[in-house]
Amino acid sequence: MYQLAQQRRPTNGFTMSIIFFLLAVAGTIQLEAQTSGGVLDKTPGVYSATTLVEVNSPASPVNDSLIAIVGVRLIDGLGGPPIDDMVVLIDGIRIVDVGPRSLVKIPENATVYDGQGKTLMPGLIDSHLHSVNDDAFLNVILKRGTTSLRDPGHPFRFYQVLDFAKSPAPRAFLTGSHMDGYPGVYKDHALLVKDHAHARETVYDYVRQGSSGIKIYFRLPLEFYAPIVKAAEACHIPVFAHLELVDADDAIRAGIDGIEHVTSFGSALADPADAKEFKDNVRAHSSARSDGRYQLWSRIDLKSDRVREVIKVAVDNDLVFSPTLTTFERQFNDPRAKDYEAKAFKNMLDFVGMAHKAGVRIVTGSHTSGWYADYGWAYQREMELLVEAGLTPMEAIVSSTMSNAAYFRSESRIGSIEKEKLADLLLIDGDPSKNISDMRKISRVMLNGVWVKN
Ligand SMILES: [Zn+2]
């Protein structure tokens, strides 16, 4: 049934790079991602100044597929209250109508699905997932509701088996190897930046290969942030960072779009003497961050002026914050966890709640796995933790859909249930706007107009 993923890389790099630079210069050229024929629609990564795309093409429905999902409770991804007894009409890969049962005309040739008692919502978008050539895992998370993901910072070759996937996979947004400073942390899959020109050229090279974002890693000195941000802006792609040695407020002022991991804020929030000790240790041995971050966070005073100031910088600069709490979760009364680790985690949760309350845009990133998440369920655990941190279930749903779509700069294609959007949809048994753990009750998943779990 599936027309399997075809095209991910340009066949003619030179032509592509010319086209790309024309696009970057013109800035306003709009290309329709789904048009057939021609060469431009095969370019991975960049389609227009405003819409970024995945490197893999999901299967499209065969024949003239017309689907009506009838009688559902609708959560559209935009944050308003759920609406009962709605109809959503899908023609091919697109949503073509959304409305109350009394107003939407259901064509006779439509295949009708009864959504009575179920919730229909947009597919989940994961801002932080790592997978190494593992199509089976990607299919597992797709069936649990993740229809788009971004791997922030690994070589493109980590996803080359997507070209041969025998089962459907989420839309994969890639960034290329993370950009780190000498001596690096993971030398076998990092790009170690030599100088400013090298930083810029790397951004352009990644975009030619299909990159839809740039990831900065924690040993890269602050001086390289500005040239990277400038080059990425010229290519209309976002920049995000994992921090340990550069303070979050400095990184934000340098122009990055997003911060990955709650721990990235540690050195900026901590008492300066504690922060210095932490950074000295990590500079000497990168691995010191693993225990050091729990020591550091266990002592952070969330009532301090520093915390308020850093949150204000994040709000003022419209930062996107992907906390990936699941990775760091440590609970009291768990024999595997030390007390200071559980205390640190409580501070991380509370900090995310404070940032959210102050207006920082929070998005959902699973970081693939965590102590308290079974295989393939890290994303749902992250949604639960965001609610524990202080988001309402509906806010956690928006963080998982429309907010991430905007972070991916793909909000004109995915992230909500609206006319013209791509049909990436979930049918849930229950109401996750009341109980976020209902996100585990996935009944059906649609990707690009095709049911991939039913
Ligand atoms: Zn990561």
Image (cartoon, rainbow, N blue to C red):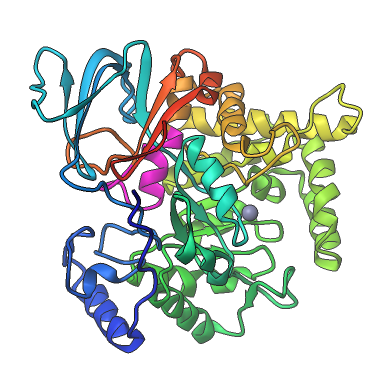
Left or right? Give the position of 446 relative to 330: left
Residue visible at 83% across and 35% down in the picture:
341
Left or right? Give the position of 27 relative to 14: left
Vertical relation: 188 (above or below) 212: below
Q: Which residue lies furthest to the front in this view?
A: 1
Residue visible at 21% across and 58% down in the picture:
34
Closer to the camera in the image, 12 or 241: 12
Closer to the camera in the image, 319 or 117: 117
Q: Is residue 133 magenta?
A: no
Point out the image quarter for the C terminus: top left
Residue 289 placement (x, y as % from top left): 80, 54
Closer to the camera in the image, 378 or 20: 378
Residue 269 placement (x, y as % from top left): 68, 43
Q: Residue furthest bottom?
A: 14
Which quadrant of the view contains residue 224?
A: bottom right
Closer to the camera in the image, 19 or 108: 108
Ligand number 1: quarter of image: bottom right
Residue visible at 52% across and 46% down in the picture:
139
Which quadrant of the view contains residue 71?
A: top left
- Region rendered in magenta: 399-414
Left or right? Give the position of 58 relative to 331: left
Residue 365 placement (x, y as % from top left): 55, 43
Tell how many labels: 0
Vertical relation: 180 (above or below) 110: below
Residue 80 placement (x, y as % from top left): 31, 21
Q: Can residue 255 be spotted in the picture?
A: no
